[in-house]
Amino acid sequence: MNRFFDIPSDLQHSWLGLIGLHLREALLPVLGGLLLALPLAQLCVRLRWLYPPVLWVTTVLYAIPSLAFFVVLIDYTGQTELTVMIPLTVYSLVVLVPAIVDGVRSVPQETLAAATAMGFGPVRRYVQVQLPIAVPAIIAGLRVATVSSISLVSVGMLIGNQGALGNLLHDAQIYNRPELAWNSVLTTAALAVLVDALLVGVRVLLTPWMPSGSGATRTRKEATAR
Amino acid sequence: MNVLHFVTSFFTDGAHWSGYDGIPTRLLEHLTYSLEALGLAALIGLPVGLVTGHYGKGGNALTLLATAARALPTFGLLVLIVMVAGFGMLPVMIPLVVLAVPPILVTTYEAMRSVEPSPVDAARGMGMRESDILLRVELPVALPLILGGLRSAAIQIISTATIAAYVSLGGLGRYIVDGLYQHNYEKVVGGATLVAALALATLAVFWAAARAAVSPGVRQT
Amino acid sequence: MSGLDSPGNGLNPTVPPVESGRKSQTRRVFGVLIRIDSVTKRYPDGTVAVDRLSLDIPDGSITVLVGPSGCGKTTTLRMINRMVEPSEGTILIDGVDSRQQPVNTLRRSMGYVIQNAGLFQHRTVVDNIATVPRMLGWSKDKSRARARELMERVGLDASFAKRYPYQLSGGQQQRVGVARALAADPPVLLMDEPFSAVDPVVRKGLQDELLRIQEELGKTIVFVTHDIDEAVKLGTMVAVLRTGGRLAQFAPPAELLSDPADEFVEDFLGADRGIRRLSFFSSAGLELLTAPIVAIDATAEQLAARGATEAPYLLVTGLDGRPLGWSEPGGLTAGQIDAGQLLPYGRPFTAGQDSLRAALDCAVLSPTGWAVAVDAEGRAAGVVSQAAIGEAIRGAHAHAHAAGPEAAQKATTR
């Protein structure tokens, strides 16, 4: 067990240090992705024709292997965290844009009409009505994007140890210490589960009007009850 | 412009078109890995998603399972399995399947749940067997969403199957990994372009499959 | 309105003076097809949806289960085809316990129609209708031929055959739903609020169509609705259920309207049950006056002769005999009658075919207070005053009362 947390000194970080680094490298891109996705999604809601091409472009960008993406970026941003974070930002768009578009579209027309009738301007309506109602869908997207981002950071190890917890994999191989690989995988997975749970908590806090538990199952049962 | 230059020089180099390291061979290898992984993931995700979705039970357990699978880092898993079990197909297949099962499983479950209850009620009232209700009433309606889940799993697999090269196997990842170590960016960019093109082709295949398999009565935007 | 007022659409030519058309069939002795015997449905959480319900559902007629939400009417229906299993009691189909046969065999022997039709959106109209025949092992061709036959039966144009449900209106979808339920020619049809989701005009059309189909095919139909008007219009027998799943009254609609069992039923029937009950009295007994009718080309002598009738107004008809409008006797000059100057005559009723309710409605709507009766071709058959209709209503009530106890006994099964 001791050897499990015995991090080789060449990584220049403690275990907790690696965790902090990992979270930064994984979460900042998702945040950036969200900031990009919000206006992009709104644009797609407004201009329906824009949505399919945006989906195709994000999907193809998403399909570019992370390693290749990193390597191409090294020319511009060097072997830095930024090189890892830029692709992760781009990848998060493929999940976040559809999530926000679907969420905003799921707001019933009557609700929007009611808001307009009450004198909400387009901006206020977006911020105070559409966005809050879209929160569950947006957070569902954030969960997938975050967990996948946390997983992908590890690949950064291949471009000069920019993979935070993933760097343990490198040392595991050169020092032939499998427990370091275990540490990397388990810690990363635990981080992902933790952040995911945190996001669920945020969802519950932000949407007190939603029934807890799976709403779909309940309504269906009720529909067949009588 | 740099990248574009790499792309053209990669594809115009005749040496990249033949032999065991030629594009056709690598493409075929990549396709084989991807199809195998997708097939395995579908074999696990589809039946479980269909049945749980049909009965509407176990949704929470399913979400938990999918979250856990998503949380496992693909690259870390690959290195770990190689270290524990040695080189071979297994270290590649396990991470790819773990990667692909959650989208298939979750979308299939949700697609089945999204089917309107009234046709199911009508079918049951007409005396249709449960298996027929699942396969002939719910599945055709849920199919567009299910295909969407399979498509997203396929794209992730194709992109990620490049890791096979890291453990000395073939596929398009060969160009990327070799290019990285040889500082040959032309190879890296060429390989990435091929992967992206393959992903694009996959999108087209799924689009065509949806056109062919989904009834015109099931309108999906 | 005329549909509501003439439930039988004159299909029974020997209309007795008291009850019109289809309703008279309650006098015929029906066999019992479905016997619900002290059935209770209790859910695991303790709620009781249906409480010791007993009903004998007669063969070859429409039995309507009606009541407010939570009265267990849908649960009762769903227990018949075992979509819901009773907690206690038995349901006998043709004398046999419904649990005797495999559940899917039971269900395939009963048509099932639900609120939003529940069509299979991935199948065309013919293939939707052919579902049960295909399940029963009929060939594809035979099933489709049968489906096309049924499309005609439910009033759907053959051009709809290859369409998908999303290409149909709500009313058309519901017609497909009915056709699908009839496809394997089951003796029983279970209908769960089938017409609730369509607009009133379409609903009326569907109701008339159902009555016609029932006349033609003689199915045993169990029909659930929360709409008492629909229950009264469609039902040969109506079971009113109260919240908590108990039977409040089981009677033919006319009896329900005249003798509600208790306050609950009376409340549920609404304020104007007296007027609505008139739907069940034929207008055949009304004494129609023909003297106050003049043709538009009437001569001065004819006009003078008509002026002396008991009616304060004259009804002017066209050359084809159809009514044009009312006029005061003095206001007409032979050869110069201007149709545009006449008072409107409101809505005529069809003598003998429409009910007293329709006749009264016509008189109330007419500016002169007199109702115009027409024959089947729309020609004026006579006129009748509000007073005369009131007289006929009193007469009909007295007659019904005399026949009442015996009729009630026949209708109420227990």
Image (cartoon, coloured by chain):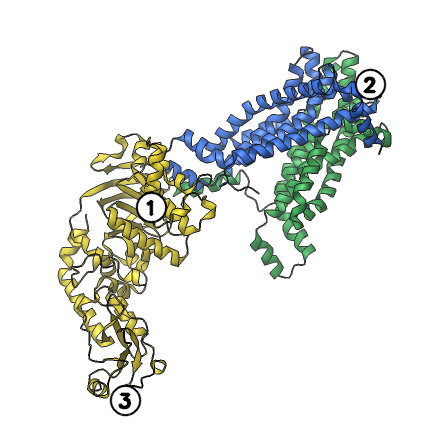
Chain colours: A green, B blue, C yellow
Label 1 – label 2 distance at C-alpha = 73 Å
SS under mark 1: strand
Three-letter amino acid code at disc 2?
A: Tyr
Left or right: where B93 falls relative to C80: right
Q: First in sequence: mark 1 or mark 3?
A: 1
Residue at (72% x, 34% y) in the render: A61
Snapshot quadrant of residue B29: top right
Pinpoint residue B20: horizontal percent, then vertical percent: 73, 14
- Quarter of the image for the N terminus of chain C: give it: bottom left
> Which of the chains bears the disc numbered 3?
C
SS under mark 3: helix
Q: Nearer the viewer, residue C414 or C91?
A: C91
Snapshot quadrant of residue C282: bottom left
SS under mark 2: helix
- 1 or 3: mark nearer the eye: 3
- 3 or 2: mark nearer the eye: 3
> Which of the chains bears the disc numbered 2?
B
Pinpoint residue C240: horizontal percent, then vertical percent: 29, 52
Left or right: where B10 falls relative to A96: right
Residue A26 in the image: above or below residue C293: above
Left or right: where A1 falls relative to C205: right
Q: Which residue is mark 2?
A: B181
Label 1 – label 3 distance at C-alpha = 58 Å
> Which of the chains bears the disc numbered 1?
C
Snapshot quadrant of residue C186: top left
Three-letter amino acid code at disc 1?
A: Met
- 1 or 2: mark nearer the eye: 2
Three-letter amino acid code at disc 3?
A: Gly
Sort mark 1 into few (<14), some (14-19) or many (20+) by Cα contacts within 10 Å: many
**Residue C191: image tag:** 1
Q: Which residue is mark 3?
A: C330
Q: Are marks 3 and 2 in contact (CB under 8 Å)?
A: no
